[in-house]
């Protein structure tokens, strides 16, 4: 089991040779971008089991993440084949116990 930054535990699956290639590829194509800053790629990507099924966990280095509660135009993006997936979010909506929870 792996403990995530929010304290939740997840079962990280063992990966076969193909999984390692996929996870490495996702690590290269996924990124968080804060408007006006250079994009940041995850330092690690895991496949994890959760009650709802499998999920991907993207680990970004918090110290290198140029994001505060006041940041605007934050975009997470990743490429799967020819498809680019993007999700925009507002860090101010991620405040928990008076702290930015990433």
Image: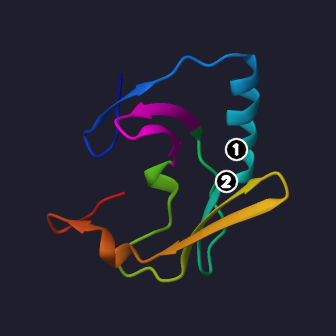
Q: Which type of secondary structure does the marked residue at label 2 adopt? A: loop
Q: Quadrant of the C terminus?
A: bottom left
Give the image location of residue 41, x and y in percent: 64, 52
Q: Which type of secondary structure does the marked residue at label 1 adopt? A: helix
Give the image location of residue 101, x and y in percent: 30, 59
Q: Quadrant of the N terminus?
A: top left
Describe residue 59's horizontal placement relative to residue 102 as left or right.
right
Few, some or many C-alpha atoms within 10 Å of disc 1 (few <14, some 14-19, many ≥20)?
many
The residue labelled by disc 1 is 26
Residue at the extreme front: 52
Describe residue 3's horizontal placement relative to residue 89 as left or right.
left
User: Residue drawn 25% across and 40% down?
Assistant: 7
Residue at the extreme left: 97
| Quadrant in the picture for residue 31 | bottom right
| Quadrant in the picture for residue 78 | bottom right
Q: Is residue 67 magenta?
A: no
Which residue range is magenta in the image?
45-60
Relative depth, front residue between 17 and 39: 17
| Contact flag, marks 1 and 2 (Cβ < 8 Å) | yes
- Please identify the dominant SS of the magenta region: strand
Q: Is residue 90 above or below residue 99?
A: below
Q: Is residue 88 above or below residue 28?
A: below
Q: How is the image coloured?
A: rainbow
Few, some or many C-alpha atoms within 10 Å of disc 2 (few <14, some 14-19, many ≥20)?
many
Point out which mark residue 30 bears: 2
Q: Is residue 16 above or below residue 54?
A: above
Relative depth, front residue between 4 and 81: 81
Residue at the extreme right: 82
Relative depth, front residue between 18 and 53: 53
Between the residue at mark 1 and the residue at mark 2, the CA separation in whole angstroms equals 6 Å
């Amino acid at each position: 089991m792996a403990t995530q930054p929010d304290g939740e535990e997840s079962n990280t699956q063992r990966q076969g040779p193909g999984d390692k290639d996929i996870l490495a590829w996702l690590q290269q194509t996924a990124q968080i971008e804060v408007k006006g800053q250079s994009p940041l790629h995850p330092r690690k990507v895991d496949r994890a089991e959760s009650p709802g099924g499998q999920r991907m966990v993207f680990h970004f280095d918090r110290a290198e993440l140029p994001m505060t509660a006041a940041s605007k135009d934050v975009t997470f993006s990743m490429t799967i084949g020819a498809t680019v997936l993007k999700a925009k979010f507002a860090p101010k909506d991620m405040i928990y116990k008076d702290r930015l929870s990433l």
